[in-house]
Image (cartoon, helix red, strand yellow):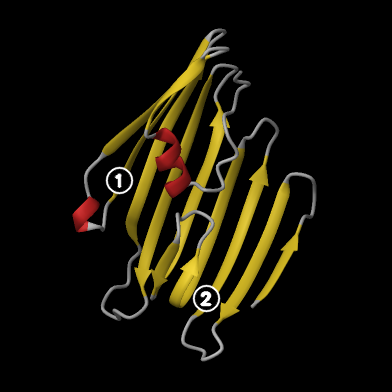
Amino acid sequence: GVQASLNPNEFTQISGAWTYSPDWEAKTGEFSLKYQLPDNQYVRFTSLSGYGVSDDADQSAEYELDSHLLSLSGQVALNHQIGVIGFGHWKYDLENESSKDYELDQVAFGLEYDDCCWAIRMLSYNNLLDEDDANNKISIEIVFKGMGRVDLGFDTVIKKYLPAYPGSLFEQE
């Protein structure tokens, strides 16, 4: 495979990759544009297409790919205590010629609140096209600064949906 990356300024990263198997049965192309702001804030757009199996930076593991995928993810601070986290993943089936629209495949949205002594992060997520896993789910993490944290699935979910997640927007001890 071939990969290339360009950083036109300190905030922007443009990358692309083309991978293939020796027998040419698995081929993928990826384009990514990421705008990184200070304090772990970012917005990222990714386009991935091909056939076979691929690893997408916004997916947990190998993703069987016979489609074109678009994803938009990011996290932004609304003020010095509240931030939002989000992910949307759209899928277009390349093998179904009758389908001409992208379908929203996965979605996640979360909030982060940080106070002097504690913080909480919540994430709601859904696999819309996976009939076995199509329920809304919520995960929560509560941090008691200087004492520890209670994680009710937040780390597992954030790593699955946003493996490129850079961490909390706010300092946590």
Query: Where the N terminus falls, by quadrant?
Result: bottom right
* Residue 97 visible to an observer of this rendering: yes
Secondary element at image label 1: strand
Taking 32 as reference, is 17 above or below it? below
Residue at the spot x=63%, y=70% of the render?
17
Which picture quadrant has residue 99? Answer: bottom left
Residue on which disc 2 sits:
28
Residue at the spot x=54%, y=8% of the render?
117
Where residue 61 appears, as percent x and y from the top left, is 45, 59
Q: Is the residue marked by circle 1 packed among few (<14), some (14-19), or many (20+) residues within 10 Å? A: some
Mark 1 or mark 2, which is nearer the start of the sequence? Answer: 2
Taking 21 as reference, is 172 above or below it? above
Where residue 8 appears, as percent x and y from the top left, is 79, 54
Residue on which disc 1 sits:
126
Taking 153 as reference, is 3 above or below it? below
Of all residues, the one furthest to the top in this rendering is 116
Looking at the rendered structure, the kind of residue marked 2 is Thr
Where residue 152 appears, as percent x and y from the top left, is 36, 29
Residue at the spot x=33%, y=55% of the render?
104
Which picture quadrant has residue 7? Answer: bottom right
Taking 155 as reference, is 49 above or below it? below
Q: Nearer the viewer, residue 146 or 7?
A: 146
Q: Is the residue marked by circle 2 packed among few (<14), some (14-19), or many (20+) residues within 10 Å? A: many
Which picture quadrant has residue 64? Answer: bottom left
